[in-house]
Image (tube, helix red, strand yellow):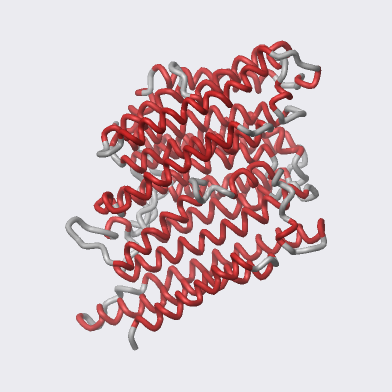
Amino acid sequence: MLINYYIFLSLALFCIGIVGVLTRRNAIIIFMCIELMLNAVNLLLVAFSKMHHLTAAAADPNAIAGTDAQIFVFFIMVVAAAEVSVGLAIIVMMYRNVHSTDVNFLNRLKH
Amino acid sequence: MNALILSAALGVIMMFSGILLKSKSAIRMLAIAGAALLLLVNLAEMNGMVLFHVNTRGMIVFDQFGLLFNTIAFACTLLYFILSGKDMEKVGNNFSDYFALIFFICCGITLTSSFKSLLILFLGIEIISIPLYILTGSDKKNLKSNEASLKYFLLGSFSTGIMLMGIALIYGTRGSFDVARLFGPGEVPSVLLMAGLLLLLFSMAFKVSAAPFHFWTPDVYDGAPTVFTSYMATVVKAAVFIAFIRLFDEGFGFLHPNWKIFFVIITVATLFIGNITAVFQQSVKRMLAYSSIAQAGFMMLALFAMNTDAKEGLLLYTTAYCLATIGIFAVLVRMKDYTFDGFNGFAKHQPLLAGVLTVFLLSLAGIPLTGGFIAKFYMLKAAMGASQGLGLLIFAVLMAAVSVYYYFRVIQAMYFKEGEENARIETSAGFRYTLVLMAALIILLGVFPNLLLGFFYF
């Protein structure tokens, strides 16, 4: 299958994520959109990894070229999990104080 | 490699020290000893004593530039612990965890100053960012701190997503994360590569708070507990700058003519917005936040020029800027009133501290005989060496002149205005001696910059 389809799909997912971050007002939904962006990148990396691997394997069946992106994806997942734990804790802390997760509340610092 | 492993281990030790040690001063002493040890092992590695041998498959290479920067960053961390360690007690109950998080940030700094693979760059930036989100929100009952940390977290992870997309697009064209193989001489850049480069540039500009990606900085720096703003605005920002210059020097050095124009725009915008907005601030803390944007604009000149002077200048600049800003923040934390009026009559009550603060402010403004002057000089020299740098240079000098206004406002308040009793703050002898030492270092750096730069070449 052509790599173009994967690029279009993950760019579409990425743009949905960006638009969500910029337009939504609920902190948790913004956070979900950020996760969507990260997963779009994961999908793209795996697709590119397969593409580079197939090219290398055509010349040498034992080639391991192109597999590094799949390792990268694992790192992204781990970091994203760490970010989720910190991020949700911050949102809960916010909720305890203002009883809302609406980011429109975030205007106290603007004097 | 010494510092990388030791800083991670120290982070874990500090986490457990909160359970084992009951006395706060014991925890603080442990942290200061840890930071000193970190500095020592890094100096040992600079002299060829590598304690841990790990095969990183070329993903991390510790060269002189990175190690020298680590030394600067760890020395600043040590001074920061000595000066502000006591003030962290007032932020919250989890005293030992703050030190643990700062040691984890040091671990990230070691990665960003020595990466050879985009994977390590990403991990380094994230290891720096995630503890910072926690530190920003560490004042749990304070709404401003909550807000700052949520804002920082959402925007920070958004920019991480953009950075990852850039890395993925670059991987698509090159098939490798190796920084040295990103772009060779004589190649024609593909559309995907240029798109990836731009996304990486935007996200890195966001992390160093360069305009037009600076909008989060004043709010986050203002809302975060002042002790941690001090660390965020100095060592962390410098570390990201080192990552920035390494990435664009080693990775995209041959594409310099293509991305130069973006740096011109970013530099001009950062210098202009940072300096002009700082003039109108009423709070010294917020003024320092904008001043950190303005100083970032000066450091961007190094990225624009990208020659030897630029790399030397960046090291000097980060040293002078970190020392001065940590010093000012250390005094500011103890003030009751953060406005300019809070400094009225400060010189009458605290002549020594006022004198030291004056040295720091003069250095930030770039007055001769201080480290800040020689650092700015190096930056301008680097910009002069690059083609078409003259216009940018003139603009930078004009903006430096603007910056004198808001730095001197503090000096004027301290010396020439009548103050009330609220300018009185309590300090220990050790605190004063450390500040005097830092002021002496800044002047020494301004007179003999080669004391620092000599390490670069030996």
Viewed as shown, does residue B123 lie left or right of B133?
left
Q: Residue at x 41, y 28 (%)?
A: B397
Viewed as shown, does residue B147 lie left or right of B301?
right
Q: x and y percent of residue B324 in the render?
A: 54, 27
Which sits in the foreground, B304 or A71?
B304
Viewed as shown, does residue B61 lie left or right of B216?
left
Q: Residue at x 30, y 69 (%)?
A: B173
Which sits in the foreground, B126 or B11?
B126
Quadrant position of residue B330? top right
Quadrant position of residue B375? top left
Q: x and y percent of residue B360 in the render?
A: 55, 23
Q: Residue at x 47, y 73 (%)?
A: A42
Q: Which residue occupies the extreme bottom position in the image?
A: A1
Q: Residue at x 54, y 51 (%)?
A: B128
Which sits in the foreground, A99 or B93?
A99
Q: x and y percent of residue B447 in the render?
A: 40, 17
Residue B156 position (above or below residue A73): above
Image quarter hosting the C terminus of chain B: top left
How many badges with numbers are in the image? 0
Residue B242 position (above or below residue B36): below
